Image (spheres, coloured by chain):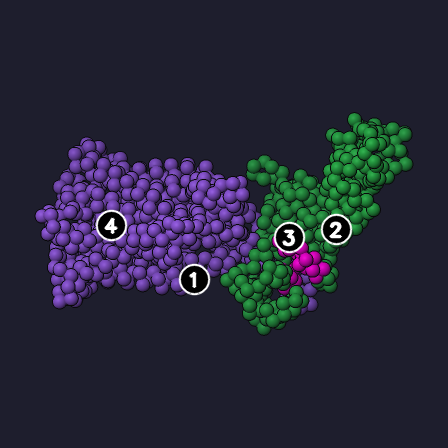
Amino acid sequence: MQRALAGAAVRGRAREGARPVRASRLRIDGVSLTRALLWVACLALVLVPLGTILVLAAGGNHVATLLQGDVVEAAVNSLVSATLSAAGAVVVGAGLAVLLDRTDLPGRRVLRLFALSPLLVPPFVGAIAWIGIAGPTSPVNFWWRDLFGAPLGTIYGGHGVVFLLVVHSYPIAMLVVSAALRRVPADLEHAARIGGASAVRALGTVTVPLLRPALVSSFTLIAVSNLADFGIPSIIGLPERYVTLSTLVYRYIQSGTVDRPLEVVATIGAVLLVIALVALVLDLLASRRRWELDSSASTPQRLPLGRSRPLVAVLAWAFVLTLTLLPLLALLSQSLLPAPGVPLAIENLTLDNVVRAVTAKGTATGATTSVLLAVLAGLVCGVLGLGIGTLVTRTRARDNGLLRAVAILPQAVPGLVIAVAWLVLAPRIGLFNTPWLILCAYITSFVALVVQAVAAPLAATPLTVEEAARASGASRFRALLDVSFRMAVPAALSGTVLVALTAVRELTLSVLLLSPGAQTLGVTIFNLQQAGAYNAASALSLLITLIGLAGLGLAARSSR
Amino acid sequence: MASVSLDSVSLRYPSGAMGLADIDLQVGDGEFVALLGPSGSGKTTLLRTVAGFLAPTAGVVRIGPDVVADGKTVVPPESRGLGMVFQQHAVWPHWNVGRNVEYPLRRAGVPRAERSARVAEVLDLVGLDGYARRDPATLSGGQRQRVALARAIVGEPRVLLLDEALSALDEPLRDRLRIELQALTRRMGLTVLHVTHDRDEALALADRVVVLDAGRIQQVATPAELVERPATALVARFVSDATRVLGSRDASGFAADGHPLRLPASGLQGAGEHGACEIAILPGDVEIAPTPAESASADTATVVSSLFGRDGNDVLLDWAGMTVRCHSRTQRPAVGAHVDVAVRRAVAYAAAR
């Protein structure tokens, strides 16, 4: 269609004439194609594995096996430890969030960083570290035994599992509650103050009740993820025969103590999956009754602690440092001592453990495998997360909500279930006994991290940004490429780094999907620990923790 | 530049709600038309239909000679040759100013050398000379809106669409950009469709104003006509804060229902049929005079509020149970004071059913 356009003709520049496009609502373009590809990826990586587990569990009737004594005992232990640890984590996390965000506690910025640090230490490393503090051969127990003839008590057993789960999950509750605290407009509290409430009463009667949705959802999130942690119960629980579902599944897979272990394990996985989904639905229902909060420009007033300020400060610092710095120091001392129980003195210090750990046969393989798998997982999750996170926030489509829900579903599914799902699927897709199986499980588990990293900042930008591109002559796909993706890339990059750093220190998935010659760093440390090389295990744990912290620090800095 | 024409355009949302109902509108080549209406009136729906972000369910939309939507086929926004400015500027944060402004030219395949010349030219035009390499994050709100304007006009659009383009700016700046916008669009001879909920802005800028309500056009008129001869009582109230009064009319004049207000036939304009009717009283046609409290009767009004204005005071009255707006150049009574009310003239309309 030719059109004489006065201005354009004079300047020798003509815009393309208008071409009517038929049936615009059904046209197939780059956007629909991208959406279709992402759906296929989600199907293959999330729905097929989780579906397989349900089908296999429904196919073979293993309810009888489930009702055996040890499965029931393990299930009870899992449920109790998950619920108790989630409750503890929410109490600790919310308390610290209020203390750090809403009071004039001295040094709260630094303390906040310390309080968040357990998030960056893999749970099984934390378990190894706490054995150094409260294990049977720890300095505390030696000293107590010298005085009273018997050890004070050890961390081994159910109480230790719950304690360590709390230590490693309260930072999540703290982050969620902290974010919710900042969303509560300060004006609400100011209004209560004007209305005659004291600062403490305003905080307690206005702000804290508004945090209830955040408390509930962090409880669910933590309970579900603690339901199937492997590292802590296997290192802390097993010495006292405290068996949970994840360690039971590991035993079934490793040592064929039951007939058809895959089907039994799939049944256990299916039960866990159902529990997780129920929790997810309950959380969604609870979040419906959320209040709409206006944004507020005024900054919240900090609660003055007054005369109790020094006391609260000492207690808070001592509490946080005990939970965070002490284990790292214990790890350090174990790394430098030749054997457990050797007194901490200058002449006893040695670097032998570090040398032995680094030069051990498994370490090099483990490091190579872990780095390779982590980088690949980071890249794949980065691309998928960029695509999904951008599409669901920057386009209008009916399936956006569903696509996003499917992509972040694995976050609400215990890692154990994902591992079992891929294990069941492996022989059928020819990945049995290969490291690629671990890669698949990593991608399933971690793609949600990137989706959320991308979607959260993009959701706040109005869609007019893309419409401006359309009005400027860009097609739907072009606007997606030029504007939406370009805006999302920084978030996707930091999501990629986060995935790689999480995957490189991962244990639960790697240990269950272990294949010959493909052990990861986490598995290397776990094996050292199981073989009794406690000090070498500590040395390697310390190394990867420090490297991980440095990596996250760099990523956080570069993304700013 | 090009004209825009809409022939009985309707838009029904999948929910069944009518976004637009039977819209007929002709915008001439180079004309500046403002779309005015309360929120939910369909003014933004109308603009987005012209832009191509919404597809009408019936009717024909033309830009210049081209049919861009006819209820079955829809030309996508990128092929319509438009420029658009949004309320929240929508300047792309990941590109510098020059790259933002240049984008429509890139999409149109303009060679690089010509692109940079055009960008420099248009940035100069909006008063951002030398800003091409700046990061948008370092610009003020007004400057970002100028970038958005430069981006909208750089490709010499057939029609410039402004979606509440000035509404997010604060008052003094909005006033200045209003002046610049008019100067710029007049000089370039641009066809402009400008959506706003700001009545003064619509009246100040437009050649013609379209008043919308509930998805229907209520009146299309020049600003002067709109103020002097509102087509319906609703338009009179929305545009000029007129007071609407129901009553009946006979040869002697108008008598309000259940109210002492009476108007002689000489003070009435508009529809002349006798019987039930509705009148709109413009605030400027209400005269008030202070009256001492002791002589107050059922016929005197009480002042509810009394706001100062540069060219007269806005007084709200409770006149025997009826709320009346008055614009008085001379009087600024205290709140609670008693005043005598006289209505100089009113416009009569056939009673709305």
**On the image, numbered disc 4 is attached to which residue?**
A508
Other-residue count near label 3 (Cα within 10 Å), few / some / many at <14 / 14–19 / ≥20 = some
Tell me if I can see residue A550 in this picture: yes
- From the viewer's perspective, tell me whether residue B152 is left or right of residue A520: right
Provide the chain ID for the residue under circle 4. A
Tell me if I can see residue A398 in this picture: no
Q: Which secondary structure, mark 3? A: loop
Asked whether residue B161 is drawn in magenta, I would say yes
Task: Name the quadrant of the C terminus of chain A.
Answer: bottom left
Q: Disc 2 to disc 3, how far (Cα)?
A: 15 Å
Residue B138 image point, x, y percent: 55, 64
Of the numbered discs in the image, which one, if any, rests on residue B208?
Answer: none
Foreground label between 4 and 1: 1
**On the image, numbered disc 3 is attached to which residue?**
B167
Other-residue count near label 2 (Cα within 10 Å), few / some / many at <14 / 14–19 / ≥20 = many
Residue closer to the observer: A108 or A412: A108
Q: Amino acid at mark 3?
A: Ser
Rendering colour (chain A):
purple
Of the numbered discs in the image, which one, if any, rests on residue B203?
Answer: 2
| 4 and 1 marks on the same chain | yes
Provide the chain ID for the residue under circle 3. B
| 4 and 3 marks on the same chain | no
Q: Disc 4 to disc 1, how far (Cα)?
A: 31 Å
